[in-house]
Amino acid sequence: MSQKITITILETSDIHGHILPIQYANHNETETGLAKIATLIRREREAADALLLVDNGDLIQGTPFAYHHAKLGREQPNPMIQCLNELGYDAAVIGNHEFNYGMDHLRKAVRESAFPWLSANTVDEATGEPLFGQPYLLRTLEGGVKVAVLGLTTQYIPNWEKAEHIRGLRFEDAVASAQRWVRHLREAEGADIVIAAYHGGFERDLFSGQPTEPLTGENQGYALCREVEGIDVLLTGHQHRLISGVEVAGVPVVQPGSGGARLGRVRLTLAREEGGRWSIREAQTDLLSPEGLEPDPAILELARPHEELTQQWLDQPIGRLLGDMRVLDPMEVRLKEHPLIEFINRVQMELSGAEISNTALFDNISPGFPEHITMRDIVSNYIYPNTLQVIRVTGRDIKAALEQSAGYFAAYHGEGPIQVSPAFSDPKPQHYNYDMWEGIEYTINISKPVGERIVRLTRQGQPLDPDGEYDVVMNNYRAAGGGNYMMFQGKPVVKDIPTDMAELLAGYIMERGTIQEALNRNWEVVWDGKDQERKEAR
């Protein structure tokens, strides 16, 4: 009779600094966060015969809590790392946002970790060796079963990250890297089970195999399952999706959302074959919700001193607003110019000297600015550690970028509510990829086909010259072509402002003390029959 064992693999991913179950914009409690997930982890550890716990990347950036540590508390131990150490993580994977605060910050986090950070395809250009020397984790568990966890990171990072943050690194193709390392794990290390932990998502529909996005290499989960022989389980992330109970080419896949929304769990039932090797008899994937659970006391206590300092910092007064910049309806902000968007664009233009600017409303929970502005309001609206760049582009590039943004809206002809198009909502919401511009005048007609929606484009009342050159200020993510804005890739950088935009906004307001709402309505979104609707409304 063959011997059987069960192995449990737990995955967190895209925690993004969400330790406590709160919203920093308004103190509201949530049912998410690592402190609640920790309660699940401890339950699973008590019940499991053998367990591996892996974080799949994007851990150390994403909340005011994480920002405060990176910018103002860097001499203290990293609280996110302290929490993972307390919970006994076996490994973490390097995500793209791990680089946002620079290599010194990442190296400090790695030094403080009681577990290895894995990424087989993130290598040192000089040596060709994986960053931090750790492509994989190999563990021998109960019964002598050898389990390997191979870390992989989206190769698309150079298209987003500031060059100085990744200098000396090369991001290799995740599929090619996996083919090499899985073979090594099977043949040289004798691994019975190979788990690929990939900070990346899926580029194709999991059932039909049809492409769901441009095949840029940002997400290669589908190809990893189909093209790499020897992967038994694929842990994924990056896209912030909730995926379980699915196999691709016979490989079980899981993805636990973001911000501590779920804990991914894989249960493998193994049997020892003749000759002593182990094989998988059954694989089960599911997502565990922390809803209704009490947060883990030890995690709360570790976070407490850092959280107190963060809250004091967030409540610092910055200045006063005359007018109204509150966000009451995110879709309305994207359909007609809003004072908050105009203000951010104006600040970008004034600080950079550029006469054209673009920015976005990053998500649907940005609250806007109240009358008395604090740091909480700044970081609740500008949630990414972006810096600014001025790049030189042509009028043709601007038109192409506007058409890309205009694809945010599903086709609309005046019936029912306006919807976000699947290209910007599936597999995850991409509100941050819809830009709104200042310094030009334009009209988007969302009744027209995608790619033909810009029906007016002028500058100072004159048609924009397709061959003319214009200096445009935008965040560094967009300037590098992030969000499929390929027209911006490789364009000359006229000016680089290496200060986080949140700091720039705070400094701008503090210097003036009082800011004034303004609105010039230089752009609009229309649809066929809108003018008739206006007449009937009168």
Image (cartoon, rainbow, N blue to C red):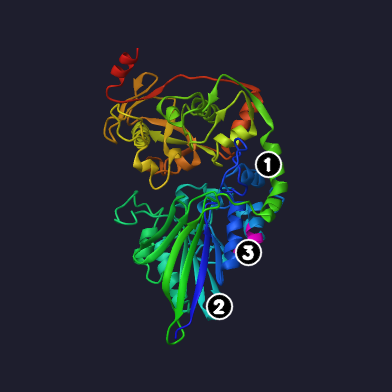
The 10 Å Cα crowd at callout 3, few under 14, some 14 to 19, many 20 or more, is some
Instruction: Locate residue 317 relative to residue 535 in the image: left or right.
Output: right
Residue in front for this viewpoint, 157 or 95: 95
Find out whether residue 387 is within the magenta segment.
no
Measure the alpha-carbon separation of dots 3 and 2: 18 Å
Q: Amino acid at mark 1?
A: Thr
Marks 3 and 2: which is nearer the front? 2
Residue that badge 3 annotates: 88
Residue that badge 1 annotates: 310
Give the magenta part as a residue range: 84-90
On screen, 506 above or below 30?
A: above
Residue that badge 2 annotates: 142
Measure the alpha-carbon separation of dots 1 and 3: 26 Å
Which residue shows up at 52% across the image and 55% down it?
A: 13
Marks 1 and 2: which is nearer the front? 2
The 10 Å Cα crowd at callout 2, few under 14, some 14 to 19, many 20 or more, is few
Sequence-wise, the earlier of marks 3 and 2 is 3
Query: Which of the 4 image quadrants contains residue 81?
Result: bottom right
Marks 1 and 3: which is nearer the front? 3
Q: What is the secondary structure assignment of the residue under circle 2?
A: helix
